[in-house]
């Protein structure tokens, strides 16, 4: 199956939603290359980037599911790199 490399940018505005986010990321752990989180204390938000290597439909599904969590925004940026 063809996979793509992408980064999912996540903004967490409601910290009570973090448990749901972490559970979802754990569910998709096999596709996650790495994760970086930055607390932006002055604004009261957290910024997370997730690097993934997965089929495009999996990336779309994960990004969409993350974005539907209350208080969380997510967007995916895709590389042109694909592999089988």
Image (cartoon, rainbow, N blue to C red):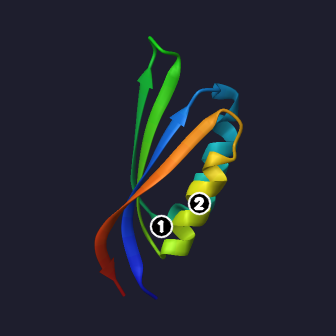
Q: Disc 1 marks which residue?
A: 31
* 82 over 9 or under it: above or below: below
Kindly identify the residue that appears in the image at 66 percent across and 50 percent down: 23
Determine the secondary structure under disc 1: helix
Along the line of sight, the residue nearer the viewer: 29 or 81: 81
Along the line of sight, the residue nearer the viewer: 23 or 3: 3
* 83 over 39 or under it: above or below: below
Kindly identify the residue that appears in the image at 50 percent across and 41 percent down: 10
* 54 over 15 or under it: above or below: below
Kindly identify the residue that appears in the image at 59 percent across and 60 percent down: 62
Determine the secondary structure under disc 2: helix
Residue 71 location (% of width, % of height): 66, 32
Q: Disc 2 marks which residue?
A: 62
Say which of marks 1 and 2 sits in front. 2
Residue 29 location (% of width, % of height): 53, 61
Q: Do the residues under discs 1 and 2 have CB atoms within 8 angstroms?
A: yes
* 52 over 45 or under it: above or below: below
Q: CA distance from mark 1 to mark 2?
A: 10 Å
Residue 22 location (% of width, % of height): 61, 45
Residue 59 location (% of width, % of height): 51, 65
């Amino acid at each position: 199956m063809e996979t793509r490399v992408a980064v999912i940018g996540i903004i967490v505005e409601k910290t009570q939603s973090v448990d749901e986010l972490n559970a979802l990321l754990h569910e998709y752990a096999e596709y996650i290359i790495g994760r970086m989180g930055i607390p932006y204390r002055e604004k009261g938000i957290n910024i997370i980037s997730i690097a993934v290597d997965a089929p495009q439909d999996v990336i779309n599904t994960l990004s969409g599911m993350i974005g539907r969590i209350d208080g969380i925004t997510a967007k995916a940026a895709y590389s042109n790199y694909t592999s089988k």
